Image (spheres, rainbow, N blue to C red):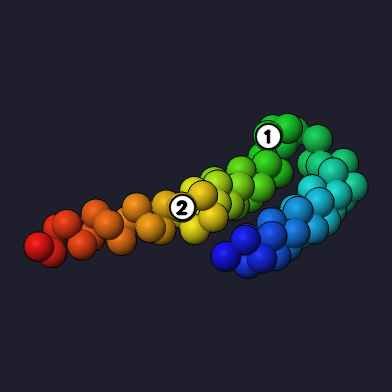
Amino acid sequence: MKKLFTIHLVIYLVVNIVWLAINYMMVIPENPNLPVWQPWYSPIGWGICIVIHYMTYVSGGEKMIMEVEAEAES
C-alpha cells in the first residue's frame, strides 16, 4: 500500500507542478484579472484526495474500517 501511495503522490506532484507552471506562464499573463487562487483549485482538490488515500490505506485506516464493518455485520 505504501508503494501505491508513493506512486500516487509522485504523479500528483509532477502533474500539479506542470499544471501550475502552465497556468502562471500562459493563462495568468493573458488574463490578469483572474483571481490568484484560481489555479489552485485542482491541486487543493486532488491534495484532499491524497490525504484521504493516506489516512485510509497507509496509516491503518483500512484495518479500522474492516473492524467497524465486521462489528456492524454481527
User: Residue lying farthest left?
Assistant: 74
Residue appearing at x 20%, y 62% in the figure: 70
Residue 24's place in the image compared with 19, above or below, is above
Does any portion of residue 13 appear in the rendered image? yes
Q: Position of residue 32 (x, y in %)?
A: 81, 35
Residue appearing at x 32%, y 56% in the figure: 65
Residue 57's place in the image compared with 28, above or below, is below
The quadrant of the rendering that contains the C terminus is bottom left
Q: Position of residue 38 (x, y in %)?
A: 67, 40
Q: Nearer the viewer, mark 2 or mark 1?
A: 2
**Crowding at label 2, few (<14), some or many (≥20) Cα neighbours within 10 Å?**
few
Asked whether the beta carbons under mark 2 and mark 1 sit within 8 Å of each other, the answer is: no
Considering depth in this image, is 13 or 32 the residue closer to the camera?
13
Residue appearing at x 63%, y 67% in the figure: 4
Q: In which image quadrant can residue 69 be found?
A: bottom left
| Amino acid under disc 1 | Trp
Label drawn at residue 37: 1
| Amino acid under disc 2 | Gly
Q: Secondary structure at mark 2?
A: loop
Considering depth in this image, is 62 or 41 the residue closer to the camera?
62
Tell how many labels.
Answer: 2
Q: Secondary structure at mark 1?
A: loop
Q: Position of residue 50 (x, y in %)?
A: 58, 52
Q: In which image quadrant can residue 14 be found?
A: bottom right
The quadrant of the rendering that contains the N terminus is bottom right
Mark 2 or mark 1, which has the lower sequence index? 1
Residue appearing at x 17%, y 57% in the figure: 71
Does any portion of residue 27 appear in the rendered image? no
Q: Position of residue 59 (x, y in %)?
A: 51, 49
Label drawn at residue 60: 2
Disc 2 versus disc 1: distance between alpha carbons? Answer: 33 Å
